[in-house]
Image (cartoon, helix red, strand yellow):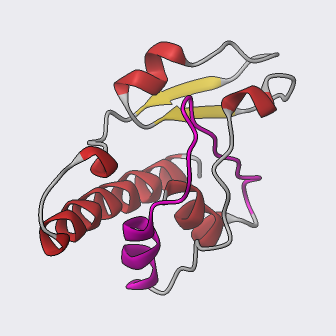
Amino acid sequence: MAEGFLRYVAGDRFEVFSAGVNPTYINPFAIRVMDEIGIDISGQQSKSIDCFLRERFDYVITLCNNAYQRCPVFHGEYVIKHWNLEDPAVVQGLEEERLNIFRRVRDDIIFRINRFIKLQG
């Protein structure tokens, strides 16, 4: 969701990559809640952080404690931001309850990305 939103609002200002420490698939609930706000992330792919170990970044943003603790060191200098967001994929419950968790996390991501962009000038 973070990759899709950042690309949508500032893809002309940032080259956006996303990866996980345990990549699996793009969660269908994430696709649905992003579609609700007009952003199609269905074409995104879940990628391993290992794919980017030789890359240089200006910013590395981790979205949960697990990612923060397991995030590798990349080449060069970069700023690391840590946003400890709830992992909506692990929440169990009825479909509407799960969608509401994904919406809450989506909205938190939107807030944080908008603030990040604003601080970058």
> Which span of residues is magenta-colored?
13-37
Examine the structure image and report whether residue 15 is included in the region drawn in magenta: yes
Tell me if residue 49 is in the magenta stretch.
no
The residue sitting at the right extreme is 54
In this rendered view, identify the residue nearer to me: 9 or 48: 48
Of residues 36 and 42, the one nearer the viewer is 42
Determine the image quadrant of residue 83.
Answer: top left
Left or right of 20 in this view: 92: left
Judge left or right: residue 90 versus residue 13. left
Please report the residue visible at 12 percent of the width from the left and 59 percent of the height from the top: 93
Question: Position of 21 compared to 77: left or right?
Answer: left
The residue depicted at 45 percent of the width and 14 percent of the height is 69
Residue 104 x/y as whole percent? 22, 61
Q: Position of residue 88 (x, y in %)?
A: 29, 51
State whether residue 59 is above or below residue 41: above
Q: In this rendering, would 77 be left or right of 88? A: right
State the image quarter where residue 6 is shown: bottom right
